[in-house]
């Protein structure tokens, strides 16, 4: 894969909302957001990446290569080894509780580790919050840290009003509604993924 995995995942995440836009109802309701992620977004990401999705093992969403899960499908039993996941993803609506999810991701240190949470502030504040919140979890990994991607909602007054107008409708958050931050092993901090 010529593109970096975090960029590819970003495209898959945004694409999931586009591809499922007629099915998704995006609101501020926590249960509905979680249900939307599990029912539509996680599977669409798996299709985009051509990876098999397993939910709740060991994280909210785990993506495995097809050769890893094919024997399990053929035998109709067993679970893939969590250490063989290509991507591990956690979704935490309450951003103040997201450190636990980042610790879970760091424990497995998959090739790509993704956390989606909802700290809604300006871009600069989000980057500072990400580093203040998670550097104590990721710095101990040093250069052994694989890719870590943090996804937060963008904070834009124009978009905020658009979201409020469309709550409960069939309109979904699109690509410009998200900020993506990638952990840099070299700089030991999150930086905006462009």
Image (cartoon, grey):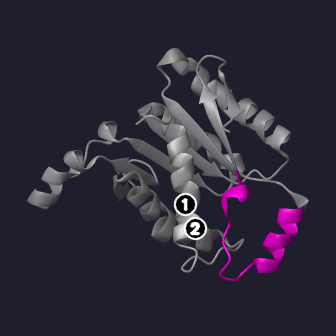
Extreme residue in the right direction = 157
Q: Compared to 30, does 192 lie above or below?
A: above
Where 59 falls versus 77 (above or below)? Answer: above
Q: Residue furthest left?
A: 75
Q: Position of residue 124 (x, y in %)?
A: 84, 38
Residue 90: image location, x then y, percent: 52, 50
Numbered disc 2: secondary structure: helix
Q: How many marks?
A: 2
| For the residues bearing labels 1 and 2, Cβ distance under 8 angstroms | yes
The residue sitting at 39% across, 47% down in the picture is 58
- Say which residue appears at 65% left-offset and 81% top-offset: 170
| Image position, residue 113 (x, y; %) | 50, 39
In the picture, measured across the screen, residue 192 lies left or right of residue 55, that is: right
In which quadrant of the rendered image does the N terminus lie?
top left
Q: Could you say which is closer to the camera, residue 163 or residue 103?
A: 163
Q: In the structure shown, which secondary structural element does the residue marked by tag 1 occupy?
A: helix
- The residue where tag 1 is placed is 15
């Amino acid at each position: 894969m010529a593109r970096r995995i975090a960029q590819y995942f970003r495209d898959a995440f945004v694409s999931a909302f586009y591809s499922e836009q007629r099915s998704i109802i995006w609101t501020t309701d926590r249960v509905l957001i979680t249900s939307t992620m599990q029912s539509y977004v996680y599977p669409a990401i798996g299709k985009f990446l051509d990876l098999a999705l397993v939910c709740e093992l060991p994280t909210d969403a785990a993506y495995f290569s097809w050769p890893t899960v094919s024997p399990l499908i053929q035998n109709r039993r067993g679970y893939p080894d969590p250490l063989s996941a290509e991507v591990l993803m956690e979704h935490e609506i309450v951003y103040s509780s997201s450190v636990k999810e980042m610790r879970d991701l760091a424990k497995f240190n998959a090739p790509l580790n993704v956390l989606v949470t909802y700290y809604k502030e300006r871009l600069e504040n989000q980057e500072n919050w990400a580093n203040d919140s998670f550097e104590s979890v990721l710095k101990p990994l040093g250069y052994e840290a694989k890719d870590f991607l943090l996804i937060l909602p963008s904070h834009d007054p124009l978009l905020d009003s658009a979201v409020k107008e469309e709550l409960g409708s069939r309109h979904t958050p699109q690509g410009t509604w998200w900020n993506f931050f990638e952990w840099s092993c070299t700089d030991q901090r999150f930086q905006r993924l462009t």
